[in-house]
Amino acid sequence: MLGGGGGGQGGSGQELRAADSAANKREFVVNVESSSSNRHSLNLRNSAFFIPPPPLTITTAHPEERGRWETVVLAYKTLGVVFGGLVTSPLYVYPSMPLKSPTEQDYLGIYSIMFWTLTLIGVVKYTSIALKADDQGEGGTFALYSLLCRNMNIGILSSKQAQTNSSLSHSVLHGSTENKSRLGIFFERSIVARRVLLFIAMLGTCMLIGDGILTPAISGSEALFADLGHFNRSSIQIAFLLTIYPSLVLTYAGQTAYLIKNPNDHDDGFYKFIPTTIYWPIFIIATLAAVVASQSLISATFSVIKQSVVLDYFPKIKVVHTSSNKEGEVYSPEVNCILMILCVAVILIFGDGKDIGNAFGVVVSLVMLITTILLTLVMIMIWRTPPWLVAIYFFIFFTMEGVYASAVLSKIPEGGWIPFAISFILAFIMFGWFYGRQKKIEYELTHKIDLGRLGILLSEPGIQRVPGFCFFYTNIQDGLTPILGHYIKNMKSLHTVTIFTTLRYLLVPKVAAHERIVVNKLGLEGVYGCVIQYGYADSLNLEGDDFLSQVTDSLQLCIQNCSGCVTSDHEEVQEEISTFEEAKLAGVVHIRGKTRFYIGNNCGWFERSMLAFYEFLHSNCRSALPALGVPLPQRIEVGMLYEA
């Protein structure tokens, strides 16, 4: 089916890799030596397809070293966004405990547990270890999974074997098995182990999102790691070690000292130990702090969902970058609205704060336990930490958090089932999307069109080259989308100038104008390749003559440089350039694909139900392509059914 309108085949962040070939085709690439340099060189080389240039050496949005004052300002901001929930914990910790006739030993024991939990989990695990396991500045459970996938070949979706721009060694990913740990080799060879790892990462992500729903009433420390993308490592460490940790230790000590003298006041232990003269000011401050406490986990929810979308494990949603120089600061209006609705529903259904507290305890314990497991894998497979250190880390934290988790699991009938229900719904959405994407990628890689096949299609009788300038969007690695063959067979034509275009998302704020467009010849008459690179703060607008002029200028430069290396008649070059101008005058069109699954009778009930659910998600989510600003009269949408 053909029609105007939106929808799209292709994807932001897609990256095409080189295919080896002896074909004598030429590529024009601008190699950028550094982001701060304007020097560039032209590199002509043999290529079998249109490929993005080698990884650009561009300063990322997460520099390790910031100005001293900037770090201090960020540390101040973390007090509300990252630690807003953690610092309000004295309001409800003692009141939530079912204490009956507590003694001095009981209170000292409780304080001892809180002190060592804050010290070991807060200071040692998260501040000293977990913050170093960031994935290009992002934190959280799914960032740990992404970090493992980037540095080891353990991903599930082959289309998302993302380029590694982190400080970790590139040789870890592409080195021989001799440089890899035995555990890493095991995960690479075992599809079952990789699926279990994906399930654990999904469970942790869903639990954290559930935490974001429950947190407007209560809070947890996982935000310290999950909110890393909104700030940086140094600012979070400074804020926690110099202000949050000592403040909480002293506050709990003061509460405990008061309750030892007044053992029956534990139900309202925070407000009663405040001196009468400053009671109301503290009450107002505490109330305002409780109002903003949810910001930490809500921000973390935005981050983990954005990570899931980038890795193609979650349906496409609108993600707004709220900072022009920090890629991790994001906001999603759709997720924010859903969180609001679910939060209100939880409060209306379970008005008792104890039930919500029980649900929150289950979430926090399980998420911390999952983080410990994933951090252990990072230590073994990526950091190559000495085994005895890994064993000490795993034994201490898995035992501690395992005890906490087993204790709160007894609260499942008393509200603890809420996060499991929320996590099951979210996990079902993630798995349904993952299953459909995996099936679609398998089909596309099996039926992709290579240059040889494209040449055969164009040489068939009845196929005509119609006047016009066409941008045909594709995202298949080392090939062209199957929609191209479907289009040529049914339309019996291809435009005289056809540019197969791929959008490449880079983790930088903006891509310089001279780096944005990469073009090359594909060796067939009137057929070219183009990669458009853009950053998260770029306004990607393909409307108007400016974009068209940039592409044609790049193509002309490519042809002229190719003619200098290959024996070619100058008149032929001029003729090819004039063909561009004629095609532009004939009209410009942007062709994108929209695919659906054809579910035949040979599919089982499970495959039928999962693909039907995927189609529902796909038809109600945003397009994989960003808003390109292409005028409606220039859009053509090509529909195709993929046989399941």
Image (spheres, rainbow, N blue to C red):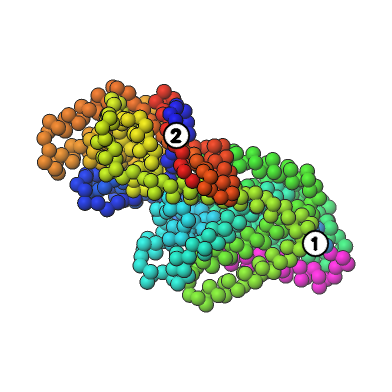
Circle 1 crowding by C-alpha within 10 Å: few under 14, some 14–19, many from 20: few
- Residue 97: which numbered mark, if any? 1
Label 2 and label 1: CA atoms lie apart by 59 Å
Residue 73's spot in the image, x, y percent? 55, 49
- Image point (32%, 30%), residue name: 492
- The residue under label 2 is 639
Along the line of sight, the residue nearer the viewer: 473 or 556: 473
Along the line of sight, the residue nearer the viewer: 219 or 324: 219
Q: In the rendered image, which quarter is residue 100 located in?
A: bottom right
Residue 337: in sight, yes or no?
A: yes
For numbered disc 1, what is the local secondary structure?
loop
For numbered disc 2, what is the local secondary structure?
strand
From the image, state whether disc 2 or disc 1 is nearer to you.
2
- Residue 456: which numbered mark, if any? none
Task: Please name the predominant secondary structure of the magenta segment in the image.
Answer: helix
Q: Is residue 215 above or below residue 488?
A: below
Residue positioned most to the bottom: 388
Q: Is residue 404 left or right of residue 69?
A: right
Residue 105's spot in the image, x, y percent? 81, 73
The range drawn in magenta is 99-127
Residue 164's spot in the image, x, y percent? 40, 55
Q: Which of the two discs, 2 and 1, labels the residue nearer the N terminus?
A: 1
Instruction: Say what amino acid the circle numbered 2 marks.
Output: Gly
Q: Is residue 197 left or right of residue 563?
A: right
Q: In the rendered image, which quarter is residue 337 located in?
A: top right
**138 falls in the magenta region:** no
